[in-house]
Amino acid sequence: MPEQLIKVRPTKIELIKLRRRLSLSQRIQKIVKDRLSIITLEFLQRASEIVESKRNLLDYFSEAYKALSITAGYHGYIALEKELVATEKDVMVATGSANLAGVRTPSFELAEAEKTIRGYNLVDTSSFLDKSVQLSEVCLKAIIELAELQRTLDLLGMEINRTKRIVNALEYLLIPGLQATIKYLYMKFEERDREEKSRLKRVKVLLQRE
Amino acid sequence: MVSQLPYQRMLEECLKGELRVLNAHLPRQQKLLSDLLAEEHPHVDCNDGSTHFFKRKELEYLASITGADEQKALLLPILIELGPNQGEVSIICEPGITEKIVVKILNMPIICEQGRITLYRPQLGVLRKVLKTTTQYVFSSRTLK
């Protein structure tokens, strides 16, 4: 793409302004590139964590379903439901935000994570139920962790796209435009100098003739 | 070919915004680990008015590798400064407690010079994996030079 010149008056003041803008743009480009590399690093890290987290989640779910099947087989579905209906409780998740190099990412944490009393009758139930409830809680924690990671990954991806656009705009549009305009202004001044010199020479010749 | 760039103004506005967001996420004030552990929802307020929450799990991990006195001296979040050299970053800290934590996490000796621990990018990855919310990036003015 050819560099587009910026419409400016060919004066020294404009040249100084353009040079300042160029230097500022180059510094910003450096910072934005730094930021992009950091965000990319975090993105890759989160991506690998998500893979691990999903694998763990599947393992936890498989274990939890196995335990639940055994419990249901031992107690029977009706008795199990009767025990568990009394223990129903809303899940409390503490939400907040964390800031990651300028990207606001969500932060989820399961409140009351370490519960020791679960609400069902310990006399009428077996250790199978304890085990399946324990595994279900682990699943819940894993889901919340995965949700946080997934959203963070989405946000980081969007930020990477945005930052890349800025880096490209600087690299291929703004900085080349400024450089071309500065070059154009230098050429204009040199041309003006040459004109001035030839004009002076002409005047000198005319004066000598007289 | 002299023409006005159509996106000139938009780009400049975008860049101004970029500089604004750069360090807007920094905390107004760092907090002591001991204070954060006592809070129900440990957090710090940021310069842009937002709130940065710490993971309790991370705080508890830090508490487990530090003594009671050290918890009263450790300021969080730990600031990671991005230097002009793209391959390196440095951690702004007083020699002592932060140094001990970084040594523990990286499992290798490090040197703290002039209040800064210099790390390479792979080491940064390891550190950030463990301390996600208790560390924050700083784009320092040195980067601008």
Image (tube, rainbow, N blue to C red):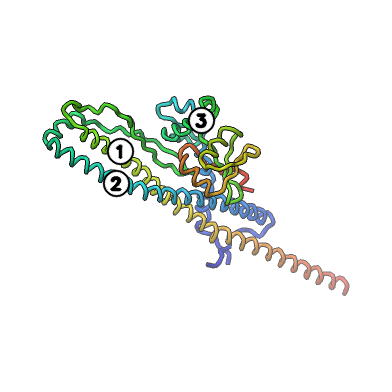
At label 3, counting other C-alpha atoms closer than 10 Å, the crowd grade (few under 14, some 14-19, many 20 or more) is some
Q: Nearer the viewer, residue A89 or A78?
A: A78
Residue A170: horizontal and vertical position, in percent?
54, 56
| Label annotation for residue B66 | 3
Question: Are there few (<14), some (14-19), or many (20+) residues within 10 Å of tag 2?
Answer: few
Q: Residue at x 43, y 42 (%)?
A: A104
Q: Chain ID for label 2?
A: A
Q: Which mark is residue A96?
A: none
Residue A183's place in the image compared with B136, above or below, is: below
Residue linked to disc 1 = A138
Chain to which mark 1 belongs: A
Residue beneath label 2, please?
A59
Task: Look at label 2 and name its amino acid.
Answer: Asp
Q: Secondary structure at mark 1?
A: helix
Residue A210 appearing in the image: no
Q: In the picture, residue B53 is in which quadrant? A: top left
Q: Quadrant of residue A2?
A: bottom right
Name the N-terminal-most of marks 1 and 2. 2
Kindly indicate whether the residue at mark 1 contacts the one at mark 3 (C-beta within 8 angstroms). Answer: no
